[in-house]
Amino acid sequence: MTSMDELVRTLHEGGFTLVMANGDDIRTFRRRGVADLVGLLDDDPAFLRGALAADKVVGKGAAALMAKGGIRALHTDVLSRPALELLRSEGISAECDRLVPHIVNRAGTGWCPVERLCHGLTSVDEMVAAIRVFVNDMKQQ
């Protein structure tokens, strides 16, 4: 069984954006944003159920995708307060190195688009549906 400490070490030493483990099955990811989580929900939702996750940055949208997938625990470098509240309400253990009011965009000029998208939403299913539309729109561009 893989420990959270091992996942966090792999995340940082490997330069990954996300590392997940379910039992002895460890997977690493490099894409930015929520693309890898959406991919897992679509292609291998069973892997997410009960998984441990180590991530660089988790906002409310990523937290909703993790909750929808049924992960057990998360450690992240940066976590938004709305994401923490969502994870706790879903019974998911969450630890972070830095808690922030919201996730900022890559340019540092405002809110992350997915964080803003999910800001006023209250249900995980609403958030996941909105994120799917957002990701599909991004693919079209």
Image: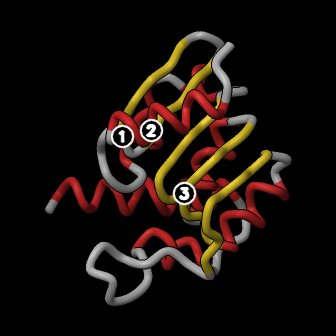
Using the numbered discs, state the Cα–Cα distance from disc 2 to disc 1 in whole angstroms: 5 Å
Amino acid under disc 3 = Asp
Which residue was labeled with disc 2? Answer: 11
N-term mark: 3 or 2? 2
Label 3 packing within 10 angstroms: few (<14), some (14-19), many (20+): some
SS at mark 3 in the image: strand
Amino acid under disc 1 = Phe
Using the numbered discs, state the Cα–Cα distance from disc 3 to disc 2 in whole angstroms: 10 Å
Which label sits on residue 16? Answer: 1
SS at mark 1 in the image: loop
Which residue was labeled with disc 3? Answer: 77
Q: Which percent across, then down, holds residue 95?
A: 71, 53
Q: Up-down: is 6 above or below 82?
A: above
SS at mark 2 in the image: helix
The residue sitting at the left extreme is: 141
Q: Which percent across, then down, holds residue 33?
A: 37, 56
Nearest to the observer: residue 141 or residue 25: 25
